[in-house]
């Protein structure tokens, strides 16, 4: 399972660089503009320059409306600025077909510029609160559009968490559907260390965190701490070893 950490700017990215051996992806977002708020192109470039070259950068393009052309331009800006993973939050898409329209435009814009870049179609575990597409529709949307990753996050950051809105069983089905479609499955949404066990058991490929590695556990006022990143990774490794041992014992 890959660990994705989301700094809110260049200074926090430098803190991520201090813990680079413990993380896999640095995710650029702007939390004050939403769950998947987009940061500025120059911030993506500065963060790309600030972290080790072997660590990929992910960039969100926002909690987007149903405007495929607008979103495609934003996605192109993110990949031109140095992002390897391009994340799109399908906030304003109320049907799967709308989601596919947006994601197809993004995939074309991104892959025409950089075929190796990975496109992430992100939905929301609390979709019922904002009226967007059902979480379990995301793998099919991503696959039909030619994206690489299906992701679930939470739209409203009010202290509720991923598992407050979708059960581990639903998350397991999300992961199963993503894998069946040949996609990676990413899960986020106020993930805590206590969630690592269930996420490992269901086969999650990428786990995204911010608050869990910020001082005081606060994604808004806290700052990412390298020792908390290291501690989160250590817990991930412990659960991975435990799960592998259990699988071996069953065999």
Image (spheres, rainbow, N blue to C red):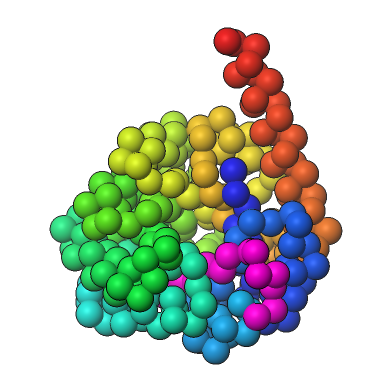
Residue placed at 56% from the left, 30% from the top? 201
Q: How many marks?
A: 0
The quadrant where residue 11 appears: bottom right
Image coordinates for residue 86, horizontal then vertical, percent: 43, 68
Most extreme residue toward the bottom is: 42
Instruction: Name the quarter where the C terminus is drawn.
Output: top right
Image coordinates for residue 20, horizontal then vertical, percent: 74, 62
Residue placed at 37% from the left, 54% from the top? 148
The quadrant where residue 77 appears: bottom left
Nearest the camera: 238 or 110? 110
Is residue 220 shown above or below 183? Answer: below
Segment colored magenta:
49-62
Instruction: Name the quarter where the N terminus is drawn.
Output: top right
Membership of 58 in magenta stretch = yes
Image coordinates for residue 224, horizontal then vertical, percent: 74, 67
* Residue 88 shows in the view: no
* Residue 81 shows in the view: yes
165 left or right of 244 in image: left
Is residue 217 shown above or below 192? Answer: below
Residue placed at 69% from the left, 73% from the top? 51
The quadrant where residue 16 appears: bottom right
């Amino acid at each position: 399972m890959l660990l994705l950490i989301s700094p809110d700017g260049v200074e926090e990215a430098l803190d991520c660089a201090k813990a680079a051996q413990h993380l896999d992806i640095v995710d650029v977002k702007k939390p004050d503009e939403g769950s998947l708020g987009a940061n500025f192109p120059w911030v993506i470039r500065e963060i790309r320059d600030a972290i080790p070259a072997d660590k990929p950068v992910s960039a969100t393009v926002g909690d987007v409306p149903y405007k495929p052309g607008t979103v495609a331009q934003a996605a192109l800006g993110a990949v031109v600025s140095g992002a390897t993973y391009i994340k799109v939050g399908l906030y304003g898409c109320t049907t799967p077909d709308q989601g596919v329209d947006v994601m197809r435009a993004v995939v074309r814009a991104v892959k025409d510029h950089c075929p190796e870049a990975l496109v992430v179609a992100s939905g929301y575990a609390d979709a019922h609160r904002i009226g967007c597409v059902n979480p379990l529709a995301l793998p099919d949307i991503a696959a039909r559009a030619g994206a690489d990753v299906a992701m679930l996050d939470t739209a409203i950051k009010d202290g509720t968490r991923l598992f407050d809105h979708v059960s581990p069983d639903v998350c397991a089905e999300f992961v199963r559907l993503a894998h069946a479609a040949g996609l990676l499955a990413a899960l986020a949404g106020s993930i805590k260390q206590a969630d690592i066990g269930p996420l490992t058991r269901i086969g999650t490929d990428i786990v995204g965190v911010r608050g869990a590695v910020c001082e005081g556990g606060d994604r808004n006022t806290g700052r990412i701490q390298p020792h908390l990143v290291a501690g989160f990774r250590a817990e991930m490794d412990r659960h991975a070893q435990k799960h592998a041992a259990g699988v071996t014992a069953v065999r």
